[in-house]
Image (spheres, helix red, strand yellow):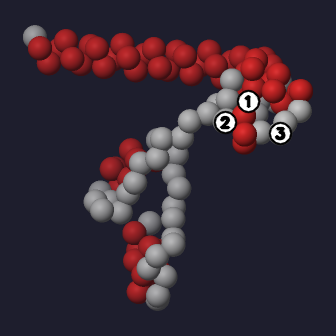
Amino acid sequence: MNPALDHGRRTGHATGRFLILGSASIDLLRQSGESVAGRIAYIDMGPFYTLELPVDESSVLRLWLRGGFPGSYLAEDDSVSLRWRIDSYRFIRKQKYFNKFRQLRAIG
């Protein structure tokens, strides 16, 4: 990845070039051994806002029932949306559990 970006800088494309990665991608960058110091920014992306969606009854109802996170809101049907929400809740719950476990382990 860095060689491609460095080539762009050498050929006059020093600004305005962005590579947007998902949340798991930072782990891949760490494994690659490339330093991203000074070249990385973290952006917390929240759910959709009502102003970002069409203003019609079905969109408002969908937002109310499914929530605004893209995986849930844009799911092909309500059952897929529900599965996404359940999986997200389980992931968050596990993360909190493991973080508490690490804290307790550091104390003792």
Three-letter amino acid code of the residue under disc 2? Phe
The relative height of residue 72 versus residue 25 in the rendered view (above or below) is: above
Q: Tell me which label, 3 or 2, sits earlier in the chain.
A: 2
Q: What residue type is labelled 3?
A: Pro
Q: Nearer the viewer, residue 96 or 42?
A: 42
Of badges 1 and 3, the one in the foreground is: 3
Quadrant in which the N terminus appears: bottom left
Q: In this view, does 75 lie to the left or right of 37?
A: right
**Which of pointers 1 and 2 indicates the residue nearer the eye?**
2
- Tell me the quarter of the picture where residue 105 sits: top left
**Residue behind mark 1:** 73
* Quadrant assignment, res 102: top left
Residue depicted at x 51% and y 51%: 21
Say which residue appears at 49% left-offset and 82% top-offset. Answer: 13
Q: Residue 54 carries which label?
A: 3
The reply to whether discs 3 and 2 touch (Cβ–Cβ < 8 Å) is no
Label 1 close to label 2 by CB (< 8 Å): yes
Residue reaching furthest bottom? 11
Q: What residue type is labelled 1?
A: Tyr
Q: Earlier in the sequence, mark 1 or mark 3?
A: 3
Q: Please tell me how crowded label 3 is: few (under 14), some (14-19), or many (20+) other residues with Cα within 10 Å.
A: few
The Cα atoms of the two marked residues, 1 and 3, are separated by 13 Å
Q: Any mark on residue 64, and which? A: none
Check disc 2: other Cα within 10 Å, few if <14, some if 14-19, many if 20+.
some
Residue 73 position by quadrant: top right
Secondary structure of residue under mark 3: loop
Secondary structure found at label 2:
loop
